[in-house]
Image (spheres, helix red, strand yellow):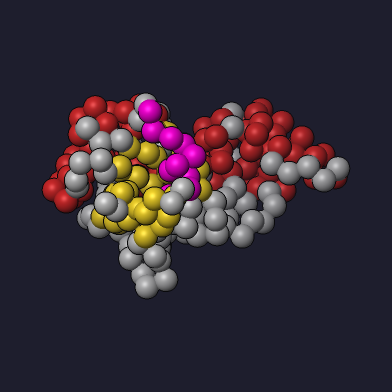
């Protein structure tokens, strides 16, 4: 953890420690449950919660697409120009990531989302594009989002079935698990969690992104109540 990241946080007057777990560079040949068993379980204690970053999970599911292998169509080349710049990354404002959104969600849906989103901006509404395009469009990480080779040259789609993946980890380990989409400017969303795990708690305890999003190689974070 970098010096700027505080490992401790108070949630409703209870103190928690966030322990980033460093792993090898993950690939599509890895299984997140086995990664947890190898790197996290040996240092876990009773009551610990497992937080998993969504992009590394997606990588283990084969969801990282090399830009060189993408066939970018005319629709992607047209629509990416209408995506608004955001401070937390490129998102769909690139032909490659827009093509992945079209592949995931369908050209008609992305076109409809772009059309309504453009009209909404004129009346001061925000967020209609992703509300219509759907969660998978919002979860796409553009080429260059990850600084870790070879994923700096890939578009990473959102993970599949995050709820089921979190529950699978809980069933196998006995520890609650959450799949988190977090960035360094305050964006924090639990996109999947094991049954009984509070979304509000996880989004509060992880809101300052204690794992970081650079080259830390910490796809897993242990959340531990300080007793």
Q: Give coordinates of residue 106: x percent, y percent.
A: 59, 29
Question: Left of 198 or right of it: where is 56?
Answer: left
Q: Identify the magenta region.
A: 196-205
Quadrant location of residue 172?
Answer: top left
Question: Left of 122 or right of it: where is 89?
Answer: left
Question: Left of 204 or right of it: where is 24?
Answer: left
Q: Give coordinates of residue 91: x percent, y percent.
A: 57, 50
Q: Give coordinates of residue 133: x percent, y percent.
A: 62, 33
Q: Give coordinates of residue 121: x percent, y percent.
A: 80, 45
Q: Is residue 36 visible?
A: yes
Q: In this view, does 217 lie above or below 156?
A: below
- Would you say the magenta stretch is mainly helix, strand or loop? helix
Q: Is residue 171 above or below residue 20?
A: above
Q: Residue at the location (58% across, 44% down)? A: 98
- Asked if residue 166 lies in the magenta stretch, the reply is no
Direction right: furthest residue: 123
Nearer to me, 169 or 201:
201
- Asked if residue 199 lies in the magenta stretch, the reply is yes
Q: Residue at the location (82% across, 39% down)? A: 119
The N terminus sits in image quarter: bottom left
Q: Is residue 142 above or below residue 72?
A: below
Q: Residue at the location (46% across, 48% down)? A: 12
Question: Left of 56 or right of it: where is 23?
Answer: left
Q: Residue at the location (25% across, 36% down)? A: 175
């Amino acid at each position: 953890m970098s010096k700027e990241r505080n490992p401790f946080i108070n949630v409703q007057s209870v103190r928690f420690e966030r322990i980033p777990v460093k792993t090898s560079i993950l690939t599509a040949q890895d299984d997140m449950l086995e990664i947890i068993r190898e790197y996290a379980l040996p240092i876990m204690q009773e009551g610990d919660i497992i937080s998993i970053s969504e992009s590394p999970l997606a990588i283990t599911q084969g969801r990282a697409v090399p830009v060189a292998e993408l066939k970018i169509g005319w629709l992607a080349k047209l629509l990416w120009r209408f995506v608004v710049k955001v401070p937390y990354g490129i998102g769909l404002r690139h032909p490659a990531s827009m093509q992945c959104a079209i592949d995931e969600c369908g050209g008609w849906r992305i076109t409809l989302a772009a059309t309504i989103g453009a009209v909404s901006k004129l009346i001061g509404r925000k967020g209609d594009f992703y509300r219509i395009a759907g969660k998978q469009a919002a979860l796409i990480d553009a080429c260059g989002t990850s600084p870790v080779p070879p994923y700096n040259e890939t578009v990473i789609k959102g993970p599949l079935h995050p709820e089921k993946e979190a529950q699978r980890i809980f069933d196998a380990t006995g520890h609650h698990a959450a799949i988190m989409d977090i960035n360094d400017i305050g964006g924090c969303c639990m996109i999947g969690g094991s049954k009984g795990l509070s979304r509000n708690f996880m989004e509060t305890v992880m809101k300052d992104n204690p794992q970081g999003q650079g080259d830390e190689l910490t796809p897993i974070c242990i959340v531990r109540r300080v007793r």
